[in-house]
Amino acid sequence: MTTPISHTDKSDFSKLEKVLVVLAICFAAIGFVVFVSSFIIFKYNDTLDFSKKVNDEKFGNLGSLIGGTVGALWSLVGVILFYITLRMQRKELAFQREELELTRGELQGQKEQMIQQNATLIQQRFESTFFQLLTLHHQIVNTMDIRRQGTITQQGRDVFKSRYSDIKREISRLSTQLEIEETYLKFYKAYQTDFGHYFRNLYHILKFINKSNLTPKEKYKYSTLVRAQLSSDELLMIFYNCLSKNGIEKFKPLIEDYHFFKNIPLEDLARPEHKELYSKEAFENTNED
């Protein structure tokens, strides 16, 4: 990897190049002076008589002088200029590499910024939908009621307390999951208009969290926000709903994965051994709690 040229190196190169250019000019000038002087001395030697026949020996000596001295000087000038060109090209390449590294760094920074902005937008869209679903959950609960002779006797979360008390009496006699499921489904069919929308929306919230691009820790955090909205009677109703065909395949695994029953009042289950119908993960505390 080539180390970028420092400001000091750039300055030294400029000084050296100036010196080399001056030397090249000097050598070229010396060569030119030697060439002209040699020609004059040869041409105007002795009497400066242009009618004299050219002395071949002297002319050969002149050629040797020019070729040996002037040629060497001008060849040196060529070497110096070639060397200066190479150094300038090397410096230009170094500048280009520096600019490329800077550009690459800027692009990387822009990429990271875009990734962060995109993550923020995804988070914002997720939270917007999540809290809309949570608001809908509360609306569903608030619209639930029990009427007797056209008069509302219980409303909201009190409905869960009353309905769970009814189902608990029936299920407390049962021990197998099949028996529980058959009894619960009869109950559910009678009150489907109250609970159908409720369970579907709650399942959809957990599914939405689980399918998101959040980290496992973030998913668990949002699941705890959902869990915090539920009363004990809601948790107990969810417990038996997920043992039926309504939730055993899709809803129940989410309940277990997100430790949804960690705060469920186990003493209020229809029978204590019903706890064994769920994996132990459903009731566990985690480090994130």
Image: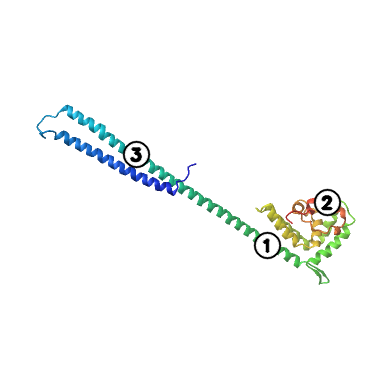
- The residue to which callout 1 is attached is 131
**Rounded to the nearest whole Å, what is the CA distance between mark 3 and mark 2?**
88 Å
Looking at the picture, which amino acid does disc 1 mark? Phe
Residue 46: percent from left, percent from top:
12, 33
Residue 147: percent from left, percent from top:
81, 69
Q: Any mark on residue 82, and which?
A: 3
Q: Any mark on residue 101, and which?
A: none
- Which image quadrant for residue 81? top left
Q: Is residue 87 above or below residue 57?
A: below
Residue 225: percent from left, percent from top:
72, 60
Determine the secondary structure under disc 1: helix
Query: In the image as oriented, which residue stretches furthest toward the right?
Result: 173
Q: Residues within 10 Å of mark 3 (few under 14, many from 20)?
A: few
Looking at the picture, which amino acid does disc 2 mark? Leu
Residue 92: percent from left, percent from top:
40, 45
Determine the secondary structure under disc 2: helix
Determine the secondary structure under disc 3: helix
**Rounded to the nearest whole Å, what is the CA distance between mark 3 and mark 1?**
72 Å
Who's the residue at 36% across and 39% down the image?
Answer: 83
